[in-house]
Image (tube, rainbow, N blue to C red):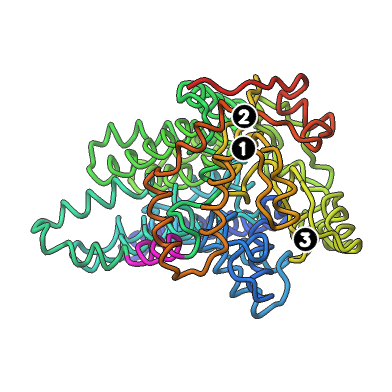
Amino acid sequence: MIMSDSKPARLSQFYDKTAAGMVAALFLAYVIVLILTAGLIDDAFIGFRVVDNLYNGFGLTWNAGERVQAYTAPLWVMVLSVVFFFTRELVYSTLIVSIILSAAAVYIVVYKISVTRGAKLFGLAALIMSKAFIDYSSSGLENPLTYLLLAVFLWVFLDFKDGRRKLFLLSLTASLAAVNRLDNLPLFLPPLLYQFLKNGEWRGNIPSFIAGLSPLIVWEGFAILYYGFPFPNTAYAKVIDTSIPILELMIRGVFYILDTLIFDPLTVLVIIGSIVIAYRLREPSALALAAGIMLQIMGVVAAGGDFMSGRFFAAPFLCAVVIICRYPWVRGWKVGFLMLSILGIGFMSYNPPPLWGLGYNDGKPVLAGIADERGAYYQGLGLVAGLKTDIPQHEFRRGGEELRRNNTRFTIQDTIGMRGYYAGPDVYILDLGALADPVIARLPQIFAHNWRAGHIVRDMPAGYNDTLISGRNMIKDPGLAKYYDKMRLITRGGIFGWERLKTIVGMNAGQYDYLIRRYNYSEYGCYLSPQLLNLNQTYRHENGLENLPCQPRQN
């Protein structure tokens, strides 16, 4: 009798050990894929230049002496600043930190949140096969830190005991994620509000809630005082002041979903599946997470999507995997079926991560200006490539180094990442995309039939170049000249000057917007600088500027 009882026990132990071994092996496979696919993209070097300026004594600036928030991810820049303090190097250090943060996030999802070994296997397989998730597990952008903060948030939300301590931890994690990137907030907001209401006695919850939000509150206060604005300049350049009708933005946002569905179907299907599962379960916490996913995607659509294929689906995808892995229905025969489905759908994607090799490049067809940004830079900025030669190896780096060698003091560029970083802090770079320029970021786009998200081509005011070179206001239009003086006071004036503080309030309240509206219909309202007219042919074609129509946009 003892022997008959021990045999099932031994079989159970064998099954448990085998399943645990499979989970460990698949986690190791994930780390290997993560290392083999690791690489940077050009936009990462925007933050690198800010870190470099900080350590050269120029503060958190893009162009030395001008306080403009040209970076989107403050917390990520802070992390890189700490890393740089110890390593005095950013390229390889950033890749290593990205791998560690991404792996830590996946470890939490698999070993802390998932409830069955079948769910762990499913989650790992899905995360390995998702091109969007793997692409931005490294890249030099803030995604790995978002992954980790989201994983911690979900762990606390799903497993910690209800109470004010839990609410504090949730609001703290959500606020850190918002400091990492402000448009992360919609993903965290529904579960955070659900927990706030679930605790009951809402008045007693407010202190814990506010205390947790302190990182975001402190950062916004600093941003308004230091930069003059609550949002990064990139938000004004890409979304807030584009003058593009909301319907047109939403159409581009839908194209962004379609692009991911076509070239990375697994990511979109898992997100849809998680929402369906949450609805069928009718479990409040799952519904709150699904609401966050939908709110986040709606925000992406309303903003017109992005030019980086799949990037803004990566964090919602991680949340979707948690919804599926959290609930014990992933067991038995369903595990095998789901694993086969994931592999089948995953290998249908364009360049699935496990098949990446040194030959990987951007061969993806461009849909509505949406490109495989990781493929475009992998050859010269991939970690594996860096084992054979120093990375980055790219014409943009060489262009920046040439600017430094020639002691260039002013230049106009349309791609500013590597060029800006390797040019050094002595070169003032005027960015045609307005990511680093607070004046032209607020001017209307030059109408282009196939505009590209994140690459809005702006008017270049007559006399603006001469103004930046000489330091004297030489802008031809009187109203815009006055607007520039106000902006210059904000970005270059004494931080605590009373006149500057009043101007910050007025600028954010729209007190000076009439100067921009007047300029749009003045004789100088659509000045095309020689630099804009002489853009390289590829850039002109990508942005629909072959004919460069010059008419003020009617509101």
Give residue 427's mark.
Answer: 3
Front residue of 262 and 518: 518
Asked whether residue 504 is in view, the answer is: yes
> In the rendering, which numbered label is found on residue 2?
none
**Quadrant in which residue 209 is drawn:** bottom left
Type of residue at label 2?
Gly
Residue at 76 percent of width and 35 percent of height: 529
Q: Residue at x 55, y 36 (%)?
A: 342
Q: Nearer the viewer, residue 352 or 135?
A: 135
Question: Does 257 sit above or below residue 57?
Answer: above
Q: Along the horizontal axis of the image, is 91 left or right of 3?
A: right
Alpha carbons under labels 2 and 1: distance apart: 8 Å
Quadrant housing the N terminus: bottom left
224 in magenta? yes
Please name the residue that numbered disc 2 is placed on: 525
Residue 448, above or below 62:
above
- Badge 3 crowding class, 10 Å Cα cut-off, few under 14, some 14 to 19, many 20 or more, is many
> Which span of residues is magenta-colored?
214-225
Q: What amino acid is labelled 3 in the image?
A: Val
Residue 136 vertical placement versus 498 (above, below): above
Q: Are marks 3 and 1 in contact (CB under 8 Å)?
A: no
Report the residue that reaches farthest toward the front: 478
Cα distance, mark 3 to mark 2? 28 Å
- Total tally of numbered discs in the picture: 3
Please tell me in which quadrant of the rendered image residue 456 appears.
Answer: top right
Which residue position is annotated with label 1? 477
Contact (Cβ within 8 Å) of mark 2 with mark 1: yes
Q: Residue furthest left?
A: 201
- Badge 3 or badge 1: first in the primary sequence: 3
